[in-house]
Image: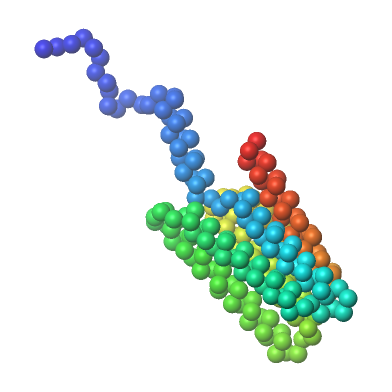
Amino acid sequence: MTTDEPRPDADAAPDLADALAIIAAQRARADDTRPVGALLFGVWGAAWLVGYGALWLTARDDGDASLLAVGVAITAGVVALVVTITHVLHRTRGIAGASAREGALYGLAWPVAFLAQSMIVGGLSQAGASGEVISLAANAIAALVVGLLYIAGGLLWRATSMYVLGAWMALTGAAAALTGFPDSYLVMAVAGGGGMLVGALVVTVRSRG
């Protein structure tokens, strides 16, 4: 029994609608693996604003930050760090091959970098550096470490917002070191934390536009 109806060609190219749908699906899948810029801007902006703000408020009179302020700053930084690593691992979960290896190596870079930072600060202390020099160096190096890791992450996942965040953090840390102690805390809180919160707002508005 025969029919005059045309048989579908298995090798026929998909029509324009199908091709666009495939492209859109691939873009959505790629976007799902990129860190969310608004989240990263927001968590680090809040951490810097609260942590360094507390340090400056207690150190502006006699130059010595209170133990409570130091505890607040350390806790805020650790929370932001944990959120960053957890978020990146969650976004890249399920990716196989070279991308998975890159994500794992990137995650390991964080503890390595901060171990190196603590060793440098310890070396300055052993060399007889003053408390002011140690404080300036510790803040500036920490900001540089986080900034460069964010820049690397922005390049790795082609996330412009993450790259910009890293550059802002590194430059803010350098500017704070030039400002001197204890006003460096104010620079880190306002220019760093406040600037990043503004960045979170900009990224959120652009994503909804």
- On-image quarter of the N terminus: top left
Give the x, y percent position of residue 173: 74, 66
Residue 65 versus residue 11 in the image, above or below: below
Q: State which quadrant residue 163 falls in.
A: bottom right
Kindly give the residue lying farthest to the front in the view shown: 68
Residue in view at x 44 percent, y 25 percent: 17
Give 31 or 201, whichever is nearer the viewer. Answer: 201
Residue in view at x 87 percent, y 79 percent: 62
Looking at the image, residue 133 sits to the left or right of residue 80; the answer is right
Q: Is residue 208 visible?
A: yes
Looking at the image, residue 114 sits to the left or right of residue 28; the answer is right
Q: Is residue 166 visible?
A: no
Kindly give the residue lying farthest to the left in the view shown: 1
Kindly give the residue lying farthest to the right in the view shown: 61
- On-image quarter of the C terminus: top right
Residue in view at x 45 percent, y 31 percent: 21
Give the x, y percent position of residue 156: 54, 55
Give the x, y percent position of residue 99: 45, 56
Looking at the image, residue 201 sits to the left or right of residue 79; the answer is right
Residue in view at x 49 percent, y 65 percent: 105
- Marks counted in the figure total 0
Residue 54 versus residue 165 in the image, above or below: below
Q: State which quadrant residue 6 falls in.
A: top left
Q: How is this picture coloured?
A: rainbow
Give the x, y percent position of residue 34: 53, 50
Looking at the image, residue 40 sits to the left or right of residue 2; the answer is right
